[in-house]
Image: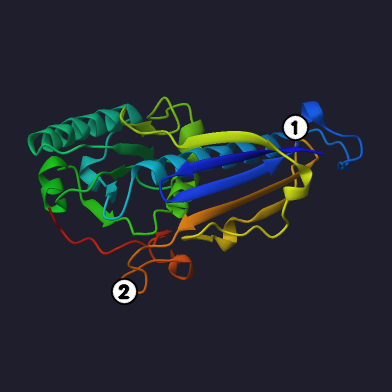
């Protein structure tokens, strides 16, 4: 029985998913017991889809030494309402656009705001810049920048941002109309789909040359909504300078338990 293979190219990553088409499903293919999805099932799938979409956007548009920026507030400068926080962020983004335009550089960004779980603050992923200049643009508190690593796979950051803002996004006073606030110049990942014969459904997929399969990305099982088998895995391009001091690869993709953020390069100002 043929199946659908979806290939998503997002920067240095290639995501492969395989599933059976419900329109062409063969009765010989086993299916798990029918199950009506609960609100918890739907919410879990929505969160997973949001994380997937954000991960692919990050991997497509950002790279080594681009910046994950946290904009915090001094206690006395905290906004009264989420709407005030949105105005603060919009003002900061105007300054950031002017800065990049003056230096003839291209600015890309994705922004989210969190205020339910802790004191209100903004998370942004932005194009590379001299981080020393951020202090003059954000005077409400402390800007905290860290550089993205050279893996090109920023799934941990996407997961963190989705979990960080899950309550805020669903709240009545949400800051952004969407799950995140993106710049208009973000590129979309390249997605292709094709019908594949059944005998190519490999239980142990192999990476293409120059890539490795991210171990934790492999998922094989029964989809909770369709009841049919699916397969998913992600290939990541091997860094050209792998092995040098400061490199990040699959073995080094650890989680920084102190900051609860994905581990990244140290924040050294640069041009």
x%, y% of residue 225? Answer: 75, 36
In the image, 199 versus 89, the foreground residue is 199
Q: Residue at x 21, y 44 (%)?
A: 76
Q: In this orientation, does residue 122 appear?
A: no
x%, y% of residue 31? Answer: 86, 41
Q: Rate crowding at label 2 as few (under 14), some (14 to 19) or many (20 or more) other CA atoms within 10 Å.
A: few
Left or right? Give the position of 12 relative to 141: right
Instruction: Say what secondary structure mark 2 lies in.
Output: loop
Residue at the outermost right position = 28
Examine the image and state in which quarter residue 214 appears.
bottom right
x%, y% of residue 26? Answer: 87, 34
Examine the image and state in which quarter residue 182 appears.
top left
Precedes in sequence: disc 2 or disc 1: 1
In the image, 178 versus 79, the foreground residue is 178
Q: In this orientation, does residue 34 appear?
A: yes
Colour scheme? rainbow
Image position of 189 with respect to 146: above or below: above
Label 2 to label 1: alpha-carbon separation: 45 Å
Q: Residue at x 43, y 69 (%)?
A: 252
Image position of 249 with respect to 197: above or below: below
Q: Rate crowding at label 1 as few (under 14), some (14 to 19) or many (20 or more) other CA atoms within 10 Å.
A: some
Residue at the outermost left position = 102
Q: Residue at x 66, y 53 (%)?
A: 219
Residue 21: give its label.
Answer: 1
x%, y% of residue 194? Answer: 64, 34
Instruction: Say what secondary structure mark 1 lies in.
Output: loop
Residue 141: give its label.
Answer: none
Residue under pointer 2: 244
Quadrant, the N terminus: top right
In the image, 180 versus 86, the foreground residue is 180
């Amino acid at each position: 029985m043929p199946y659908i293979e979806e290939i998503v190219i997002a920067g240095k990553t290639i995501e492969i998913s395989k599933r059976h088409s419900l329109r062409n499903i063969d009765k010989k293919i086993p299916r798990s017991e029918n199950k009506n999805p609960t609100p918890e099932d739907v919410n879990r799938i929505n969160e997973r889809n949001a994380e997937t979409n954000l991960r692919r956007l990050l991997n497509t548009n950002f790279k080594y030494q681009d910046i994950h920026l946290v904009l915090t507030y001094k206690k006395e400068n905290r906004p009264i309402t989420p709407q005030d926080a949105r105005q603060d962020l919009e003002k900061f983004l105007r300054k950031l656009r002017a800065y990049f335009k003056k230096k003839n550089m291209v600015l890309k960004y994705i922004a989210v705001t969190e205020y339910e779980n802790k004191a209100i603050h903004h998370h942004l992923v932005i194009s590379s810049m001299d981080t020393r200049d951020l202090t003059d643009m954000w005077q409400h508190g402390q800007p905290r920048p860290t550089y993205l690593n050279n893996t090109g796979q920023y799934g941990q950051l996407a997961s963190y941002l989705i979990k960080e803002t899950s309550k805020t996004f669903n709240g009545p006073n949400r800051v952004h109309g969407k799950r995140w606030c993106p710049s208009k110049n973000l590129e979309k990942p390249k997605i292709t789909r094709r019908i594949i014969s059944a005998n190519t459904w490999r239980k142990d997929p192999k990476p293409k040359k120059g890539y490795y399969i991210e171990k934790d990305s492999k998922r094989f099982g029964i989809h909770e909504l369709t009841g049919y088998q699916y397969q998913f895995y992600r290939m990541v391009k091997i860094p050209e300078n792998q092995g040098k001091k400061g490199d990040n690869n699959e073995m080094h993709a650890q989680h920084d338990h102190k900051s609860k953020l994905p581990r990244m390069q140290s924040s050294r100002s640069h041009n």
